[in-house]
Each structure stands twice: as structure tokens, then as C-alpha cells.
Amino acid sequence: MSNKDIMGTIGLYLPKTTIVKLKQLALAEGTSVSAIVEELIAPRLLNGPREPEPKKPNRRLNID
């Protein structure tokens, strides 16, 4: 099985400043952006879906 068979691509929309900092970090660490993203996401995937946060009541101010 080749790397092409197990790897895929995804488009992420992030603030440009975040992208620049992420690329700089990868360069400084001698790694890839993908490796950093995988390292950060892996624990979250292991935890599975989060319970939705309870909705806060809609408190409208009634002014007559």
C-alpha cells in the first residue's frame, strides 16, 4: 500500500496569520504542517463527539 493510498487532502480555511505561524513552526521544528495538525487533532478524534452545550435561554429585555 502506497502513501497515496492512505493519505488524503482537506481544505481548511484559517486566518492568514495562523497559517503563517503554523508554517513557521513546522519549519523551525523540521517537520510538516500536516504532522503538526495530525498531532493536534489525534487526541480530539480519540475522545469522540462532544456533548452539545446546553442552550442558554433567550433573555429579551421587554421595554414598554
Image (cartoon, rainbow, N blue to C red):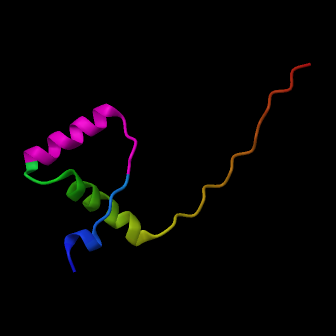
- Nearer to us in this view, 55 or 44: 44
Q: Is residue 47 left or right of residue 33?
A: right
Q: Is residue 31 above or below residue 51?
A: above
In the picture, the quarter occupied by the C terminus is top right
The picture places residue 52, in percent across and down from the top left corner, at 60, 59
In the picture, the quarter occupied by the N terminus is bottom left
Q: Residue at x 29, y 32 (%)?
A: 17
The picture places residue 23, in percent across and down from the top left corner, at 19, 42
Q: Main secondary structure of the magenta part?
A: helix
Q: Residue at x 32, y 66 (%)?
A: 42
- Nearer to us in this view, 59 or 23: 23
Residue situated furthest top in the rendering = 64
Task: Please state the total of marks drawn on the protein image.
Answer: 0
Q: Is residue 13 magenta?
A: yes
The picture places residue 25, in percent across and down from the top left corner, at 16, 44
- Nearer to us in this view, 56 or 46: 46
Q: Is residue 64 above or below residue 7?
A: above
Q: Is residue 29 magenta?
A: no
Q: Residue at x 28, y 55 (%)?
A: 37
Q: Quadrant of residue 58?
A: top right
Residue range of the region highlighted in magenta in the rendering:
11-28
The picture places residue 55, in percent across and down from the top left corner, at 68, 50
Q: Residue at x 28, y 61 (%)?
A: 38
Q: Quadrant of residue 7?
A: bottom left
